[in-house]
Amino acid sequence: MKSFAKITALSLCGLFAFGLAACGDDAGDAGEVVVWGGAEDQTLLTSLVGEFKAANPDVKESIRVEIQDPWNAQSVVAKDPETAADVILCQNDHIGIMAKAGLLAEIRDGTAATFATDIKTNNDAATVQQVTYNGALYGFPLTMDTYIMYYTTNIFPESLENTLLSSVDQMLAANMPNIAGSTEKAAAFGFNIGDGFYLNMGFFAVGCTLFGEDGTDVNACNWNNADGMKFMQYAAKNFRQSGGKFKSDDAKNLATAVLNNRLGACISGAWEMKDTFKGAKNIKYRTLPTITVGGQERPLVSFSNSKVYVVNNKSEHKATASRLAAFITSEQNQLRYASERGYYPSNKNAQNNSAVKDDPFFKIIREQLDKSVPVPVIPEISRYWEAAKAVGSSIYNGSLAGDDASLQKSLNDFIGNLQSTL
């Protein structure tokens, strides 16, 4: 990141895609490109970097892989962009925040590079939108992510999938067995209500929106309206820890509880099929269940987002960084991520490959993605997460009283936090 590279003719053409030029000393001082990825992806990412180097002998920089959780990559880069990686894996909701702060290189076409055109042409329209801020592209999409419901057939037989398991209310009303070797009963259903990535489900189910219908209006959030109150009343009644049937925890912990027959069903990310369940035969999955609110049965509505590779605007190797990001997120390599990591691809051809299209698990992911609401890209999304955590956590731990006045105040405070100065 810190050293200045001599750019080959092909790399120089790539730099023109950013409206930049570069010069250096000699090929022996080409410098280093650093790429960040999650801990679980390191084996695959390291292999891809090796393949990229072998396929691109004109690239003179060395390339080093480092572990960095994509969930907080934005905050790490913001603290010191000069020492951050050149190529960074992050969540799409970081795009607006980082682009507004000038931390990301805009992705454009150049004389010998069609990065922007390829992104728009080859990827699902939803993910193209998720890497776009103020009309400009800032990322190379890698995945489409959402969450589904997992359950253990040791507690809930698969024959109940379209009846009891299709309804949160029926699961919470079920007579639960004791946990093996204990007098404690297994919980029925869970999700991380203290995480805004999951709290939204009930509000979206009743028709509320976050930052408007398309997620771009900073002043448009109506969770404190009459419909939002209906869900709050439902949550205060059904999603408290004291009830015993519902469990809130980190999504991975919930998945582990389902695997160990301490919890009948949970909502968790698609990646848990590879990370936690690892093909366990007693684990099944389906799209999100319903809740009954205001006398109407409504399906929970998931958030969806995408993992994307971005280029650090402070990188001295933007050409190579962009070529590497494009290579990692190519059709064939997205299929590798699908096979080895359980990630649903953003590339349209990869989605239509039989390895994805005909896979039962990915069919469920696709079905839920089609019912989902994308996480907004605007920088103001950063206000949402802590505000949502306060609402969800207070419901679960009982610190929020269940009377209507308290519930309404909590929602009004939530809206106030969203509209505070960024």
Image (spheres, rainbow, N blue to C red):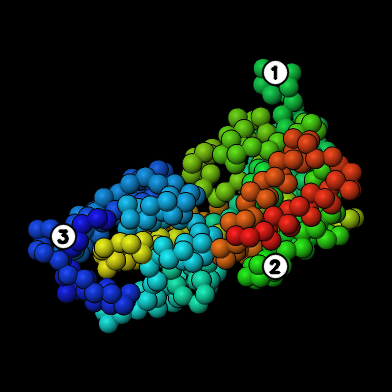
Residue drawn 35% across and 53% down? Answer: 84
Query: Is 67 left or right of 248, judged from the image as shown?
Result: left
Which residue type carries mark 2? Asn
Query: Few, some or many C-alpha atoms within 10 Å of disc 3 (few <14, some 14-19, many ≥20)?
Result: many
Q: Residue at x 46, y 63 (%)?
A: 101
Q: Nearer the viewer, residue 126 or 77?
A: 77
Mark 3 or 2: the one toward you:
2
Q: Amino acid at mark 1?
A: Ser
> In x, y percent, where is residue 420?
67, 59
Real-space CA distance between mark 3 and mark 1, rounded to the nearest whole angstrom: 63 Å
The mark nearer the N terminus, 1 or 2, is 1
Rendered image quadrant of residue 300: bottom right
Q: Earlier in the sequence, mark 3 or mark 1?
A: 3
Tag 3 near tag 2, CB within 8 Å: no
Q: Residues within 10 Å of mark 2 (few under 14, many from 20)?
A: few
Q: Can you tell which mark lies on residue 30?
A: 3
Does residue 203 appear to the left or right of 374 in the view shown? right
Please tell me whether mark 1 sits on a helix, a strand or a loop.
loop
Please name the residue that numbered disc 1 is placed on: 182
The furthest residue to the bottom: 111
Classify the position of the C terminus by image quarter.
bottom right
Q: Is 94 placed above or below 283 here?
A: below
Residue wearing tag 2: 219
> Which one is closest to the eye, mark 3 or mark 1?
3
